[in-house]
């Protein structure tokens, strides 16, 4: 059994579940947030354009949380993961009348 | 989308209460092959730092709280709503520039001189180039959560 990387859970936002066989959560293994996301889009390639832009960076409205913490205030995609960690994909919702 | 008239009234009232600033909130419900069904609202504060008369922001922490509240009720976040004070109920260039994932329903209510007017629903096209209109199907008030 491989124990080098943590198994973590990623919560999938409702409109993206069509790309994960309707799974609400996906289990991946990864030592960091970046590795976990990489595994997620390798497993479900149609998710990739929704999460990443053409340069391969997370889209500006896509926030990743580990538990209650925004990875922007941790170590971004290099944030290390403990086994059992729960990642959430959280959109920044904004707009206006003009 | 499908929604009860009382929930639409709550969106209108929220828009009137925050006028001249924009209101915003999340739509909780169920997502199915024939669209989103809204069963509850999760109003939040407009977190835009300035110019709230023509901009709104839902903080990611509020989204996360709404998602957890939805899950406790067996629901999901299926979309968002916001008001357009003294502007028509159609997506602005800013709305398109800030759009998130196709599949969410975006409800817009126009509020003219403090009174709610037209209310419309939209979703982002799969290629992210435009918002497409969604029909609003009014459900009877007695409709229950599990008869999807
Ligand atoms: Zn707008």
Image (cartoon, grey):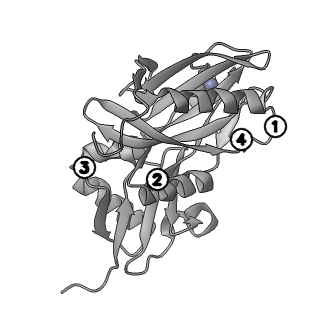
Check chain identity for marks 4 and 2: say if they share one.
yes
Percent position of residue B135, x then y: 40, 18
For disc 4, the marked residue is B46
Identify the residue at the far left of this view. A1
Within 8 Å of ligand 1, the CB of disc 4?
no
For disc 1, the marked residue is B50
Percent position of residue B146, x then y: 30, 46
Q: Quadrant of the N terminus of chain A?
A: bottom left
Q: Quadrant of ligand 1?
A: top right
For disc 3, the marked residue is A22
Q: Nearer the viewer, mark 3 or mark 2?
A: 2
CA gap between label 3 and label 2 equals 17 Å
Neighbourhood count class around disc 2 (C-alpha, 10 Å): few under 14, some 14–19, many 20 upward: many
Helix, strand, or loop for circle 3? loop
Judge left or right: residue B56 versus residue B139: right
Q: Is residue B79 visible?
A: yes
Percent position of residue B70, x then y: 46, 53
Neighbourhood count class around disc 1 (C-alpha, 10 Å): few under 14, some 14–19, many 20 upward: few
């Amino acid at each position: 059994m491989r124990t080098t990387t943590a198994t973590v859970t990623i919560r999938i936002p409702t409109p993206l579940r069509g790309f994960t066989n309707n799974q609400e959560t996906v289990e991946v293994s990864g030592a960091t947030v970046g590795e976990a996301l990489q595994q997620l889009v390798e497993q479900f390639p149609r998710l990739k354009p929704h999460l990443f832009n053409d340069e391969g960076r997370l889209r500006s409205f896509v926030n990743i949380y580990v538990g209650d913490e925004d990875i922007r205030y941790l170590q971004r995609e290099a944030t290390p993961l403990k086994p059992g960690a729960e990642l959430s994909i959280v959109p920044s919702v904004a707009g206006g009348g003009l | 989308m499908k929604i009860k008239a009382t929930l639409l009234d709550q969106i209108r009232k929220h828009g009137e209460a925050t006028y001249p600033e924009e209101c915003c909130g999340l739509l909780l419900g169920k997502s199915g092959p024939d669209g989103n069904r809204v069963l509850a609202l999760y109003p939040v504060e407009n977190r835009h730092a300035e110019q709230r008369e023509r901009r709104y922001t839902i903080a990611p922490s509020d989204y996360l709280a709404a998602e957890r509240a939805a899950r406790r009720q067996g629901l999901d976040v299926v979309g968002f709503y916001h008001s357009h004070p003294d502007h028509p109920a159609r997506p602005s260039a800013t709305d398109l520039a800030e759009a998130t994932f196709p599949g969410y329903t975006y409800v817009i209510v126009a509020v003219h001189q403090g009174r709610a007017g037209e209310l419309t629903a939209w979703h982002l096209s799969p290629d992210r180039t435009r918002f497409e209109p969604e029909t609003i199907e009014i459900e009877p008030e007695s409709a229950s959560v599990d008869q999807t």
